[in-house]
Amino acid sequence: MNRREFLAGLAAQPLTSRRQKNVPFITVDDLNRMLGCFGNRQVHTPNIDRLARGGVRFTQAFSQYASCLPSRISFLSGWYPGM
């Protein structure tokens, strides 16, 4: 199903019967911006690049903490690291 068919299907449904959207949450340790979708020509990431072309790419995102685990838990729980 392409994007046009998906949107046409949503428009055909009443507002109250629309299904909730699925939002994938992808987390990777120590990746930084070393991806093809951010212009890196040495790293080949075709699947992530394809996902970035069809979705939203955050170019000014910030981390709650300099370490992976506290930052991830802070994002998922809404609590500040160190509390």
Image: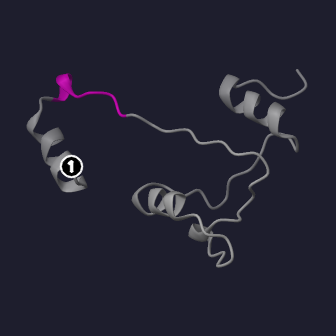
Residue 79 picture quarter: top right
The stretch of residues the image draws in magenta is 15-21
Q: Which residue is mark 1?
A: 1
Identify whether 80 is placed above or below 51.
above
Q: Would you say residue 20 sits in the magenta stretch?
A: yes
Q: Percent position (x, y) of residue 26?
A: 59, 42
Please, which colouring scheme is shown?
one colour
Report whether 33 appears left or right of 5: right
Give the farthest residue toward the right.
82
In the image, residue 60 lies in the stretch drawn in magenta: no
Residue at 74% across, 34% down: 72
Q: Quadrant of the C terminus?
A: top right
Q: Residue at x 18, y 23 (%)?
A: 17
Element assignment for label 1 = loop
Vertical arrangement, residue 44 with respect to residue 58, above or below: below
Q: Quadrant of residue 70?
A: top right
Residue in the image at 66% along x and 27% along y: 76
Who is closer to the viewer here, 38 or 83? Answer: 38
Q: Is residue 36 left or right of residue 78?
A: left
Instruction: Tell me if residue 12 comes above or below residue 45 in the rendering.
Output: above
The picture places residue 36, in percent across and down from the top left corner, at 60, 70
- The kind of residue tagged 1 is Met
Instruction: Give how far across and how far down residue 37 sits, in percent.
Output: 56, 68
Spot occupied by residue 8 in the image (x, y as percentages of width and height): 13, 47
Mark 1 residue crowding within 10 angstroms, few (<14) / some (14–19) / many (20+): few
Count up the numbered dots.
Answer: 1
Residue at 46% across, 56% down: 51
Task: State whether residue 3 is above or below residue 83.
Answer: below
Determine the residue located farthest toward the bottom in the rendered image: 41
The quadrant where residue 57 appears: bottom right
